[in-house]
Structures are given as structure tokens and as C-alpha cells.
């Protein structure tokens, strides 16, 4: 029996001001016993908040999954809760509600919650819309909610007796492969709408495109192992909010596909040369618009689109009738 309810693992880089905001909201929590493990990666970090509940450890070389694993190894809590350093808890009883929910679900369930977007830039908001659609794509699957966000994620400590994060994946949806291994082992995902964290994430155009490259690159690595993996979506309901960020979302899709192509060619992931100089100018440059012509309409992603995507996938050649029907049923239930 562990002595603490929660070990909160925070991979952190060099922005101590951002981290200080998260620690402030954590240390005002009530109703749960917890420790906070700040894992500085890749450079060591001085303690910015003196409190016996907060420990600082260092992990190198660079990589969010290396930092997560280092935090797990140092943890003493019954449950491990992962937060990003640019998040904030929005209520003083967040950890109490989280602990109660985890105990009711049991150790075979992975619990995730949403982000409340608090960024102000176009690139940040466009990326938030991509995340929302990604979460929606994974709801009501045979394993529950199979798409969860790594910056608001909780698991029982016994999970890590058999599973750790893949340290070869440094960034770009780094938790996706880990979660798919859990689903294959019989774990279930639960999405808790009532456990949000405020995500104060500001993305520059370059950071936005770098994420797209890395996520496309790593999806291409994983898609052979997991035929049911849904690539980061680029087909959206044509709402006014989506139309507002059409250029950014189309740029993301183009670069995401480029990242997948780089992996197929055996290259190291890098921002495409054709787009790198454009990021240093305007985020709504005419050149970017030319990459994504206006006549390319953002169309709804239908059930038939999903079926075609699965049916033509190179790793799904077995095409058994039972598996195909299960997939169609999943799509129907997710509507």
C-alpha cells in the first residue's frame, strides 16, 4: 500500500515562470495526499518553490518520455498523474475529485481529461481545435476513450511494473504509442469532462509546424504496428470556428503528411525546406495560402471515409469480416 494518493509528474524545461504558475495551483489543493515531482529535461533546474511536497530531479538527454519515466521511477504515490508544466488546475478540489474518480474506476483504467485553451495566438488556437477533433475521433471505441492527452493523464502505479513510455519517441504525440500498448493489454480509457486543466500554451508558427512534422513522422512509425490507429485528423465539420483557421489547419495537414513521407524515406524529421522561410514572415502569408489553395474545401469526414481509410491501409490486409464489422460498429457508435 502506497503512503500517498498521488504522485504528480511534471516534465519541465527551462521556463521557471510557467512552472511556478502550475506549482501555485497544485500546492493550494485540498482533500488528497500528494507529492509533486518536477523532472527538468534536458538541463538541470533550481528549486523555484520550497515545499516538502515538491521534489526536483533531472533527466537527460532531451525527451518528454525520458522525463516521464524518470518521474515514475521516483514516485511514491498509488496513482501517477502527468501534467504539462504550462497547465493550471482550475479548482482547489481538482486532486480530490481526481482521486475519487480513479478509485471508483480501478487500476485497469487510464483516466484523462480535457484542456481549457488559454492561449491567444492563431497557431495555438488552431492546434487546440486539432486536439479537440483528435479526442472526438477516439470516443466510444471498444476500449473506451482511446485518445487521451499526455498533459492531463492518470494511471495506477502498477501499470508501470510492465509498461514504460517509449524513450525513442522524444516529442510529437509521445504518449500515443504507450496508450496503444495498454489498450492491447486489456486496459480501458476513460475521459472525464469534469476534470479539465487550463492549458496556457502559446505556439509560434515554427513550433506549430514542428509538431506537425514530428506527429506525422511518429504516426507513420506506429501505423504498421497498430492498424486501428487513426492518424491526427485533417477532416473537420465545416463550422465557422474551423473556417476561421482553415489556412493553419490545412498547413498542418500538408506538413503532417510530409512528416509521414520523411519516415517512409528513412530520413530524420525536419521542417520542410519549402515552408521554413515562410514561418519567419507573416502567419497569413500569400505563399502559405498558395500551399493550401482556397478551392480545397474542408469537407466533413464521413463514415465511408473512415471505412475507406481502414480498408486501404497497408497493414490491414487480413480484412476479416468480423474485424471489419467491429470497426464499422465503432464508427456508427461514435456518430
Image: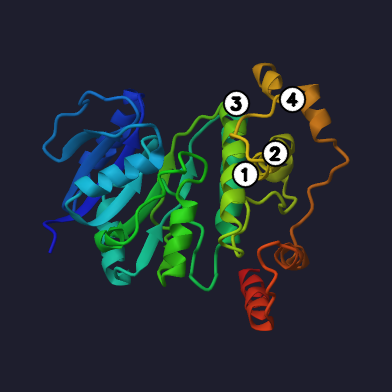
Q: Position of residue 94 (x, y in %)?
A: 30, 51
Badge 1 density bin: few <14, some 14–19, many ≥20, Cα 10 Å: many
Name the quadrant containing residue 326: bottom right
Residues at marks 3 and 4, CA–CA distance in whole angstroms:
13 Å
Q: Which residue is mark 4?
A: 274
Q: Residue furthest front?
A: 266
Give the mark nearest the N terminus, 2 or 4: 2
Query: Horizontal placement of 285 versus 114: left or right?
Result: right
Question: Distance between the Cα atoms at labels 1 and 3?
Answer: 15 Å
Q: Of discs 1 and 3, which sits in the foreground?
A: 1
Q: Are marks 1 and 2 in contact (CB under 8 Å)?
A: yes
Which residue is the site of mark 3?
Answer: 206
Which of the marked residues, 1 or 3, is nearer the chain's N terminus?
Answer: 3
Q: Is residue 273 left or right of residue 66?
A: right
What is the spatial separation of the Cα atoms under label 2 and label 3, in whole angstroms? 15 Å
Q: Earlier in the sequence, mark 3 or mark 4?
A: 3
- Report the front residue among 149 and 66: 66
Does any portion of residue 129 appear in the rendered image? no
First-in-chain label (2 vs 3) = 3
Q: Could you say which is closer to the camera, residue 178 or residue 87?
A: 178
Which residue is painted at 35% across and 24% down in the image?
14
Q: Is residue 146 something that shows in the picture?
A: yes
Is the Cβ of the residue at disc 1 closer than 8 Å to that at disc 3?
A: no
User: Label 1 belongs to which residue?
Assistant: 216
The quadrant of the picture occupied by the N terminus is bottom left
> In the rendered view, would you say 204 is above or below 243?
above
**How much space separates mark 2 and mark 4, taking CA atoms?**
11 Å
Asked whether, in this view, residue 44 is left or right of residue 296, the answer is left
Q: Which residue is mark 2?
A: 258
Q: Nearer the viewer, mark 3 or mark 4?
A: 4
Amino acid at each position: 500500500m502506497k503512503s500517498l494518493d498521488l504522485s504528480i509528474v511534471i516534465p519541465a524545461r527551462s521556463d521557471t515562470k510557467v512552472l511556478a504558475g502550475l506549482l501555485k495551483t497544485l500546492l493550494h489543493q485540498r482533500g488528497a495526499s500528494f507529492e509533486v515531482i518536477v523532472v527538468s529535461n534536458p538541463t538541470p533546474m533550481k528549486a523555484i518553490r520550497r515545499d516538502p511536497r515538491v521534489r526536483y530531479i533531472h533527466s537527460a538527454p532531451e525527451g518528454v518520455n525520458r522525463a516521464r519515466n524518470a518521474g515514475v521511477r521516483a514516485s511514491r504515490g498509488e496513482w501517477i498523474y502527468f501534467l504539462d508544466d504550462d497547465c493550471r488546475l482550475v479548482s482547489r478540489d481538482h486532486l480530490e475529485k481526481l482521486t475519487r474518480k480513479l478509485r471508483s474506476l480501478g487500476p485497469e483504467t487510464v483516466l484523462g481529461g480535457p484542456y481549457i485553451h488559454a492561449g491567444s495566438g492563431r497557431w495555438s488556437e488552431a492546434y487546440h481545435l486539432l486536439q479537440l477533433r483528435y479526442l472526438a475521433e477516439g470516443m466510444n471505441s471498444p476500449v473506451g476513450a482511446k485518445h487521451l492527452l499526455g498533459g492531463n493523464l492518470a494511471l495506477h502505479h502498477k501499470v508501470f511494473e510492465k509498461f514504460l513510455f517509449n524513450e525513442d519517441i522524444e516529442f510529437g504525440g509521445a504518449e500515443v504509442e504507450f496508450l496503444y500498448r495498454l489498450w492491447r493489454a486489456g486496459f480501458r480509457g476513460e475521459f472525464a469532462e469534469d476534470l479539465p486543466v487550463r492549458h496556457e500554451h502559446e505556439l509560434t508558427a515554427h513550433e506549430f509546424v514542428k509538431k506537425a512534422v514530428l506527429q506525422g513522422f511518429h504516426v507513420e512509425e506506429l501505423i504498421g504496428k497498430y492498424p486501428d490507429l487513426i492518424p491526427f485528423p485533417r477532416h473537420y465539420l465545416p463550422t465557422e470556428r474551423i473556417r476561421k483557421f482553415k489556412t493553419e489547419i490545412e498547413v498542418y495537414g500538408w506538413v503532417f503528411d510530409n512528416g509521414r513521407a520523411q519516415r517512409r524515406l528513412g530520413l530524420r524529421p525536419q521542417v520542410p525546406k519549402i515552408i521554413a522561410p515562410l514561418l519567419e514572415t507573416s502567419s497569413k502569408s500569400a505563399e502559405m495560402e498558395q500551399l493550401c489553395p482556397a478551392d480545397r474545401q474542408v469537407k466533413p469526414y464521413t463514415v465511408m471515409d473512415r471505412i475507406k481509410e481502414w480498408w486501404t491501409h497497408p497493414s490491414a490486409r487480413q480484412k476479416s469480416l468480423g474485424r471489419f464489422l467491429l470497426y464499422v460498429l465503432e464508427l456508427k457508435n461514435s456518430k
